[in-house]
Image (spheres, rainbow, N blue to C red):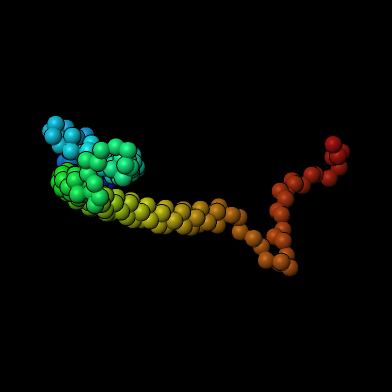
Amino acid sequence: MQQPQRKDQMSIGREIEDIARDLIKHQHDHPPVRDLNREFDRKLTFTDRVASDFARLVGSWVFVLAQLGLMLLWVLLNALSVLRHWDPYPFLFLNFVFSLEAAIWVSVVLMALNRQADRDRMRAQNDYELNVKAEEELKALMNHLMHQDEILLQIVNRLDRGDREMKRLARRLEQVLEANAEASRPPQTPQGAPASPVSTPAQPERPLGLPTP
């Protein structure tokens, strides 16, 4: 009787050790979370940083207002008759400057967009790795829960068997106690039956003429 119980306890202990071993192994399978922004900024060269700063400047209201102010000043200075006109109407030199500036800024912005695309590609790869890691974590968690369910089911089955055995022993004990109580109980006489006469010891006869004590 003790050997099956010992085997069950050993099997439960092995299951718990396997679960703990799987948890420890799973915790060390994956590298820590990376800071993509810091890694990407560390890989940028000096020209990349300059291009990013210029692209950030071009996409701001400061640059737009500065360009508008320079254009108005250029037109006013060339429209007034007081000063010497270095770019008279229709302002061909101004158009040439704007075209050259637009070509340069477009190239700079495209460089910045390429770097942004590289950053987005790195983020997408990191998101994919995180999704794979989360899927593996969920699989491991489900396996651990399945192991725990099996152990809990074994414990519940043993408790159920123990409960049934205790109930059986309790019923058996009640039957034994009732049998002992009936055996030790005195027999009862039926009602209306005459009681058995009590016999008294006979006294010896006295001879005549002797005084009574």
The residue furthest front is 81
Q: Is residue 166 visible?
A: yes
The one of 116 and 64 positioned closer to us in this rendering: 64
Q: Residue at x 52, y 56 (%)?
A: 178
- Indicate the quadrant where residue 79 lies: top left
Residue 10 seen anywhere in this rendered image of the structure: no
Q: Position of residue 106 (x, y in %)?
A: 18, 48
How many numbered marks appear? 0
- Residue 160 image point, x, y percent: 38, 56
The residue under the point 86% across, 39% down is: 212
Question: Is 189 situated above or below 199?
Answer: below
**What quarter of the picture does the C terminus occupy?**
top right
Residue 56 location, x and y as percent? 26, 40
Q: Residue at x 86, y 42 (%)?
A: 209
User: For this view, does 211 lie left or right of residue 150?
Assistant: right
Q: Is residue 46 above or below residue 58?
A: above
